[in-house]
Image (tube, rainbow, N blue to C red):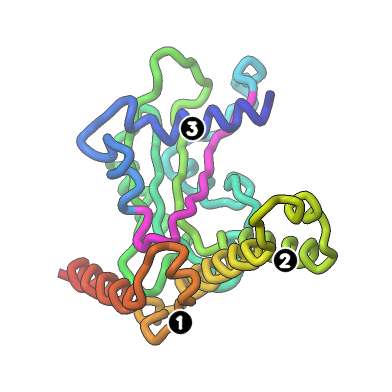
Amino acid sequence: SHMNSIVSTVMAASTTTLRYPGYMNNDLVGLVASLIPTPRCHFLMTAYTPMAINDAQVTEKNVRKTTVLDVMRRLTQPKNIMVSASTRRENSCYISVLNIIQGDVDPTQVHKALQRIRERRLVNFIPWGPAGIQVALSRKSPHVETAHKVSGCMLANHTCMAQMFQRTVNQYDKIRKRGAFIDNYRKQDGFELEEFDSSREVVSSLVEEYQAAERPDYTTWGVDGGVRGQDNASNGIGQGSGSNRGAALQAEDADARY
């Protein structure tokens, strides 16, 4: 029941700008478009604070301070992020961040909170392009009573996702080496075990791309064949995808400067 409560709370918070539309982030495409700079790095992670599993147990004594600054600061803490990967690893960085703040919030509080976060350098961003924390303000549902005046949900694109995919690859290698759990697949007509190995290469290349996104030369990464041809074929990308992506990112960076 606790897991269901967490999932429903995060899903409701992440779609609140769609259900209570404003002048920004009022459709799903616009919500995620700014979070995904490249097609392959599209795996987002979420965070939510303050989390109260049962509002009936919340009293005035255990209600945490919920100013805008505290909410935005706690959203970047690993204990509030719902992905089994560490965002504090060396060289790991945010590609993009969207904070959805619910409650009666003054926009000046948001600007002050962003300034404090920037001064304290609480968040590391990619070195190869413009990046920052986007903030969407939304009102709370009138049908749900909560003990906290302000709550926040974070949708972020972070290079730590490479850790999760690398862990999956390592687990697959152990199973593949032992030949475990493949008897039922061998009984299927027309099935070849090489399909598993091909899928492993796709995941490995995804890990490499997230790791490359941590470096300043990511805009030129893959131009000279760094992206595997097999992965390109599986994603329907032609041989010139690396150069096209690099040119697109450079043009996007130039536009941001002006």
Which residue is tagged 1? 226
Which residue is tagged 2? 170
The kind of secondary structure element at disc 3 is: helix
Q: Mark 3 is on which residue type?
A: Met
Q: Is residue 84 found inside the magenta-colored segment of the image? A: no
- Which residue in the rendered view is the most extreme toward the bottom? 224
Marks 2 and 1 sit apart, C-alpha to C-alpha, by 22 Å
Determine if residue 238 is in view. yes
The kind of secondary structure element at disc 1 is: loop
Start-end of magenta stretch: 35-53
Q: Quadrant of residue 226?
A: bottom left
Marks 3 and 2 sit apart, C-alpha to C-alpha, by 30 Å
Which residue is tagged 3? 11
Residue pictured at 45% horizontal, 52% vertical: 156
Q: Position of residue 58 (x, y in %)?
A: 62, 21
Marks 3 and 1 sit apart, C-alpha to C-alpha, by 37 Å
Crowdedness near tag 3: few (<14), some (14–19) or many (≥20) residues, C-alpha within 10 Å: few
Determine if residue 119 is in view. no
Asked if 52 appears above or below 233 in the picture, the reply is: above
Q: Mark 2 is on which residue type?
A: Asn
Q: The N terminus is located in which quarter?
A: top right
Residue pictured at 55% horizontal, 34% vertical: 50
Q: Is residue 103 left or right of residue 212?
A: left
Q: Of the two numbered discs 3 and 1 on the same chain, state the one appearing first in sequence.
A: 3
Pair 3/2: label in front = 2
Crowdedness near tag 2: few (<14), some (14–19) or many (≥20) residues, C-alpha within 10 Å: few
Crowdedness near tag 1: few (<14), some (14–19) or many (≥20) residues, C-alpha within 10 Å: few
Q: Mark 1 is on which residue type?
A: Gly
- Which residue in the rendered view is the most extreme toward the front? 189
Q: Is residue 209 left or right of residue 249?
A: right
